[in-house]
Amino acid sequence: MVATQSGPFQHYFDSFRQFLAYEKGLSQHTVLNYLRDLDKLEAWALAHERVELAELDAGAIRQCLAQLHEGGLAESSLQRWLSSIRTFFAYMVRKAHIAQNPSAGITAPRKSRRLPRVLDTDQASQLLAGKPSDWLGLRDHAMTELLYSSGLRLAELARLDIDGIDFADATVTVLGKGNKTRTVPVGTIAITHLKAWLAVRSERALQDEVALFIGRRGKRLGHRAIQQRLAKLGAEKGMDQKVNPHMLRHSFASHLLESSGDLRAVQELLGHANLSTTQIYTHLDFQHLASVYDTAHPRAGRKHGEEGEESQ
């Protein structure tokens, strides 16, 4: 339902519609979305006998937001609804219908972050098992090893040139988000597979091509092609989930954090600007944490009746 029927706030909505359409120049579709969001607020107001604009204070907006949330409205829709409400009340302040924007400072529930899908160590070993012989297999194995070894992003891998690998130092230097360069270690096994790939790469590459990973035409391998090849490799190795570059990056981070517990180091290796981004990888299995505790804590394994325990 769009706000076209007569209601206590209709004249405000009509004025707001004119503002959106003619002053801001928004499309009819966008204007209707704004009005649908205002409909929700008006429906709540009428149900709670609030028929004056001044009665739509911060408390009212919070209650309406909570009701929409409890009613199952998606987080993204709640964010849009609140944005519409803020814009409407800002216009009301501008037109001097109210003194201040009651929606200022109110935030919608944040969209829940999905945990990244990862391979466990056994699955990673299964994926990387075997010794390919043809050039496609050598290339795909080298790509997969590098992704898992160094936690590269898809874009970083696709952009990588031959000189990005330093075999003497066993490192790779990539250009990451925000055009920031970072250098990360490359594992011994990955180095071995990269050398095997480079031994046959020259037979396929165009003369002036500097990309580390190339396709059948001798040119740089694109994002989509990399994704397709990893998915194909995963299927061939009998993986029970579709393998993709991000999964290998997530697996790198999760396994490294699980073994080291050093969140800051993992942040640096991943190239995350904020530690909060890296903290999503702290979803370690509780049983694993309990096992570490039992093994590492000096008093974790003490049994009832041992020295130091009071008699009952």
Image (spheres, rainbow, N blue to C red):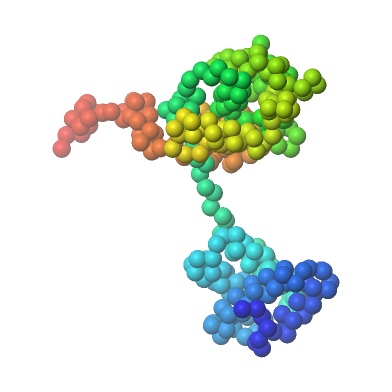
Q: Is residue 71 left or right of residue 81?
A: left
Q: Residue drawn at (59%, 32%), measured in percent from left and top?
A: 229
Residue 8 point in image, percent of width and height: 66, 87
Residue 124 point in image, percent of width and height: 47, 28
Q: Is residue 235 left or right of residue 180?
A: left
Question: Is the residue 241 above or below the residue 108 in the image?
Answer: above
How many tags in the picture?
Answer: 0
Q: Quadrant of the N terminus?
A: bottom right
Residue 92 point in image, percent of width and height: 75, 76
Question: Is the residue 86 above or below the residue 271 in the image?
Answer: below
Query: In front: 98, or 108?
Result: 108
Q: Residue furthest top?
A: 168
Question: Is the residue 34 above or below the residue 311 in the image?
Answer: below
> Where is residue 30, by image quadrant?
bottom right
> Where is residue 96, by image quadrant?
bottom right
Q: Residue drawn at (38%, 29%), measured in percent from left and top?
A: 292
Q: Residue furthest bottom?
A: 6
Q: Residue drawn at (58%, 80%), measured in percent from left and top?
A: 43
> Where is residue 159, by image quadrant?
top right
Q: Looking at the image, can residue 246 be seen?
A: yes
Residue 304 point in image, percent of width and height: 20, 32
Q: Looking at the image, can residue 191 be seen?
A: no
Q: Residue drawn at (68%, 18%), measured in percent from left and top?
A: 201
Q: Quadrant of the C terminus?
A: top left
